[in-house]
Image (spheres, coloured by chain):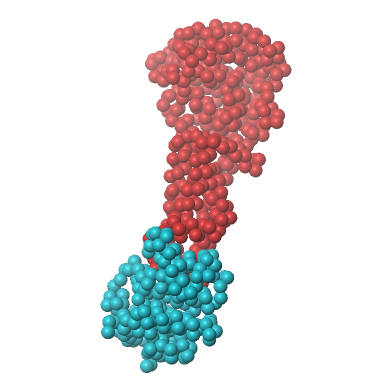
Chain colours: A cyan, B red
Amino acid sequence: MVKAIEIKNLKKTYQKGKANEVDALKCINLNINKGEFIAITGPSGCGKSTLLHSIGCLDGFDEGLYYLNGEDVHSLTNKQLAKIRNKTIGFVLQEHGLLADRLCWENVAIPLQISERNKKTIEGKSKAILMKFGLDEIMNKPPSQISVGQKQRVSIARALACDPDIILCDEPTGSLDSKNAMKIIETLKELNKLGKTIIIVTHNPNIAKECERVLILDEGRFVT
Amino acid sequence: MKNLLYFSLQMLSSRVLKTIVIIILIFLSFYLLSINISVLLDFTHTNRILEKQNFKNAYFFSYSNTIDINNSNQINQIDESIEQLPFITEISKMYRIDGFSDEVQELINVIMYDQITIEALNWEIEDGEWLYETDKRFIPGIVDKTYCPNIMVGDIIEVEMFDVVNQENKTTKSIKIIGLIDKEYFSLLRCIGEYTASEDIIESALQPTLLLPIVYDSAGQIIGNEYPQRIIWSNGNLDQNQIYSDLKNEIINFGSIANIYSMKNNQILRNNHFFQWEGLLCFVLTLITIVSIIGYNILLIEQEKRDIAIYLLCGMENKNIQQIFITHNIILSATSLLMLVSTFFVNLKINLLNIFYFEITQKLEVFLFTMIIYIIIYGLIIMYINNIIKKKSIIDLLRESEIW
């Protein structure tokens, strides 16, 4: 199997050297193959989000090695890290993170606008993704005029705009009812079948059990 | 980054009113700044003229016989008037008869007691128009021949005295031209005028002004000795292409001080005496603008942090955010600058709060200096804003905007 993510002895400490020093991640070892569907779960403050930040190239780490598609992330420049966030990793957040003053298709278009120049291509691709998700009717509406479940699906569509290999989801169903939550999970499962590597951070055991592999994090370490 | 303009315009479109206010503020500040530069350049220019011409002396003399040169109170009043003019300190205040050389004294006597007996020009303003008080006043008129652009040294011209009261020509004098007022001296007078009154007033004030260039040879001797024939009457319309700058000149300007003195209590003149207030206003407005631009940008970062966080999450770098802000600021400043350039073309007049009356001069160097200062100030602001953006981390922005 081809490794999508390989993490060795990863450590992350906040407020290093100060009285309130916190070891958020302690010696994390993790291998994720391409096309895996993984849930990371654990109590609040166990370091789930910190790990996701590091995996998503949003934040650095103090010690250890992190290989993304075989590339040493620690040695990458800011420009290369930004390109990874644009092309290789898609983010789905609990609070969807849609911009209120843009239409749904314009929200989906943001990653494309960063990397593409042709306006017609951008609009075409964005609308095509929304159509795939059955969101044709809402593509020209602002986020304020659609339901929470639809917002989250638009958010997933945005994460897929540049066709990334890896989708990182932080509590993607956290703000949804069980029916909408299952819809989102089904959508993610479909994406996984298409070969996408999906990593979900969740508190919800029902969501976690839908994943192929469940990793439990406690006090900055994996316990299973 | 692709589509930089798209992201900058997105930022603009969400705050149209604030954008308009900041554009007007920038424009106003730099407009006033350009006026300050204009005045400063004129002042420097005046000094340059003085140095270049190498005037032996420049006398200012009032031909007004309402100013009694033996009356120390009046003399002191004139002194006070002159003291208010920054430029006059550069020039000898030789309006007292005993301050002149023998030759000049003789000339003055001729003018004052033999030929011209006019009283002070009392200027009044009525509905924005300048009026002469005409009772008992004689204003030296200009003969048509002096308007002739081809006037040459050595020509004999006729000078008429015009009786304002009776509206008829009173006397005619034949005068031989022994020298001409050159362009730079004329601009010097205008420059002095700009400190004392608006351009319109100076146009009027120069009308009854008698300019007397006395030309010396290289040994310092006065060329010619028949004084009445040395007088050149001018209303400023002399041919500006004819210059005589090789010789040392002693120039007497009859009338300026009288005009200044009579205009002293006038509203517009008082406003112009607020030159230092104008300067302060320009400085304060520029300062307010700088603070406003910085404040506006910081507020923009704060208001747009959700957008910035999403942009960063979707693959932008902090550098790209800086570029968006630079583009945004360039759009604002370019619009203000466009307005500023327009004022140069339309020669816009601004009567600010009915107190400060400004009219910008159409000089390329004023525009260039304003541009340079503009770029320096904006460059510094952008550097400061860039530094703030550089320090922003994605995680902090995501948390602050409650996205993650």
Q: Position of residue B113 (x, y in %)?
A: 62, 11
A106 to A174, vertically: above or below: above
The residue nearer to you, when weighing A43 against B107, is A43
What residue sits 64% from the left and 16% below the top?
Answer: B139
Quadrant of image for the N terminus of chain A = bottom left
What residue sits 49% from the left and 59% below the top?
Answer: B10
A3 to B376, vertically: above or below: below
Quadrant of image for the C terminus of chain A = bottom left
Residue lying at the far bottom of the rendered structure = A224
Would you say residue A10 is visible in this rendering? no
What residue sits 59% from the left and 31% below the top?
Answer: B197
Q: Position of residue A164 (x, y in %)?
A: 36, 73
Would you say residue B264 is visible in this rendering? yes
The residue nearer to you, when weighing A11 against B180, is A11
What residue sits 62% from the left and 7% below the top?
Answer: B171
B393 to B209, vertically: above or below: below
Taking the image as shown, residue B264 lies to the left or right of residue A202, namely right
A25 to B54, vertically: above or below: below
Taking the image as shown, residue A87 lies to the left or right of residue B35, namely left
Circle count: 0
Residue lying at the far right of the rendered structure = B135
Q: Position of residue B44 (x, y in %)?
A: 46, 34
**Rendered image quadrant of residue A165:** bottom left
